[in-house]
Amino acid sequence: IHNDYINSAINNKNTYELLKQFDKIWFVSKSCENAFLCKYQAFKGKTDYLNDCLDIQRINKLSVEQCDLKRRDCLNIVSVSRLSPEKAHIRTLHILKQLKEKGYKFFWHIIGDGPEKDKIKRTITQLDIGDCVEMYGAKENPYPYIKQSDLLMLNSINESFGIVLIESMLLNTPIFTTNTVSAMEIVGENGIVCDNNSNAIYM
């Protein structure tokens, strides 16, 4: 199970009945497994977890390639994710609008594509923050963008096992993330994990 089962669309009666037919259920993180077992204790003894594997040498090699990151003379923040509701780009834009009004200097580089692409573009225009946000679309090699940024931000509402957090750690880019199911398990003391609400992100 490669998601936060409790807070995802697959948490329904049909999926529950299907899972009962399996001898073993594997999760992508210990936190995902624990969350599942807290609600469905009947599956105790039938679950386990295995973290995603990453090719460290490949990531480091790809990270030194050229990219079109438009660095600014300020805090350069990067996000690499699908442009979909659970990734909370719209929420983040409204928070950044407040920070801009407070006089903070930053530039948010958004890497990715998805169903909320047009909505995100419209929101950037409506909030008048086009001077501190850039959308690059999907990138086959996102690693140079992560490596060349000052901060990796992942403000998801739901996230099972944020691989981009591990990639950022490998590339020595500091992390700011919301407290999704596996955030503390991955990040620990290697970044900032804040409560998953707008006020906490803003503060």
Image (cartoon, helix red, strand yellow):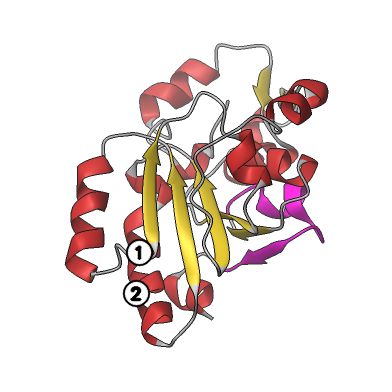
Side (left or right) of 143 relative to 49: left
Q: Secondary structure at mark 2?
A: helix
Q: For the point 63% across and 37% down, which residue is it?
A: 144
Measure the C-alpha gap from mark 2 to mark 1.
6 Å
Does residue 199 appear to the left or right of 165 in the view shown? left
Provide residue 193's location: percent of width, then percent of height.
Answer: 66, 63
The quarter in which the N terminus is drawn is top right
Disc 1: CA contacts within 10 A as few (<14), some (14-19) or many (>=20): some
Is residue 17 placed above or below 185 in the rendered structure?
A: above
In the image, residue 169 sits, relative to residue 10, either above or below, namely: below
Q: Image point 47% across, 39% down: which residue?
A: 81
The residue pinned by badge 2 equals: 97
Give yes or no for residue 74 being in the magenta stretch.
no
Closest to the observer: 184 or 151? 151
Picture coordinates of residue 51 (x, y %)?
74, 29
Residue 35 can be seen, yes or no: no
Query: Does residue 183 belong to the magenta stretch?
Result: yes
Identified by mark 2, the residue type is Lys
**Pointers 2 and 1 in contact (C-beta within 8 Å):** yes
* Number of other residues with Cα within 10 Å of mark 2, as a class: few under 14, some 14 to 19, many 20 or more: some
In this rendering, would 178 be left or right of 193?
Answer: left
Magenta range is 180-195
Residue 42 locus on image (x, y percent): 63, 32
Towards the viewer: 16 or 28? 28
